[in-house]
Image: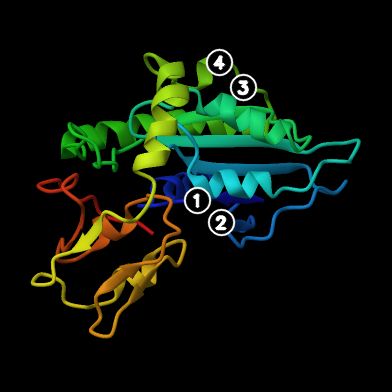
Amino acid sequence: MIYYFTGTGNSLAIVRQLQKLRNKQEEGVTAIDYTTPYPRLTDECTEIGFVFPVYGWGLPLVAEDFIRRLPGNTNKRSPYIYVILTCGDDIGCTDKQVRKLFAEKGWNVNAIFSVQMRNTYICLPGFQTDPANLEQQKNEKALTWLRQISQRIEAHEPSSNNDVHPGAFPRMKSYVLRPLFNKFLIHDRHFKVNAKACIACGKCVRICPLHNIQADAIGMPQWLGQCTHCLRCFHACPKHAIEYGLFTQGKSQVKVKL
């Protein structure tokens, strides 16, 4: 059983590759949103996995909400619980946030791993997508690391601090910058559409993982206020017609892989 959230496809790629490596392609996989039913712990449940991206050195708000909605663990026996965090560079103290959120529900997280993948976040000055050669290098390293992760999950091994990459100044990033990031950037008020470029194809409406976009009378997208800032709409627009204020002007798109 794996629960995941993906914006542009990094975390979903990890889920699929992990299933392949473990020969568990038929394993139940659920993409979460704000209405996803939570897993219930039973004596028959021996393993639960969670795969989430890292946004602003913390979990996406939708992932936080999902964990907070988990039932309290009253079972004497707990399943092996692992969490894989995908990131463009580093995770700050996201692993500590994860453990704290699960512990509040009485769930013990046995292992947390971080996997560096292509960078997709471009809403801050100096943030840009990776050049093709760097993306390829990250993909190769991610697959090598995921092979090791797969073996350790299969053996139900615990993780260590060496299995995540907090980066420089992790506490400042997660406990100082992240609250500011959430307050001022994790919303959809800055999204705008270039009406001359938009072809009203409706792709952004169809693919939003939180169903947070609707089309107006002439087919232009409108955001509904429940954004987790995955930027799938920005990256997937075939005409590059969506911008996030001035933050994304001149920034590249990545291919959305779903």
Provide the residue designation for mark 1. Answer: 5
Q: Earlier in the sequence, mark 4 or mark 2?
A: 2
- The picture places residue 2, in percent across and down from the top left corner, at 61, 49
Closer to the camera, 241 or 17? 241
Quadrant of the rendering where the C terminus is positioned: bottom left
Distance from disc 1 to disc 2, alpha carbons, whole Å, reads 6 Å
- SS at mark 1 in the image: loop
Q: Earlier in the sequence, mark 1 or mark 2?
A: 1
- The picture places residue 156, in percent across and down from the top left corner, at 70, 30
- SS at mark 3 in the image: loop
Distance from disc 3 to disc 1, alpha carbons, whole Å, reads 22 Å
How dense is the environment of label 3, judged by Cα within 10 Å: few (below 14), some, or many (20 and up)? some
Provide the residue designation for mark 2. Answer: 32
Q: Is 199 positioned to the left or the right of 91 in the image?
A: left
Please report contact status of discs 2 and 3: CB closer than 8 Å, yes or no. no
Amino acid type at circle 3 is Ser
Q: Earlier in the sequence, mark 2 or mark 3?
A: 2
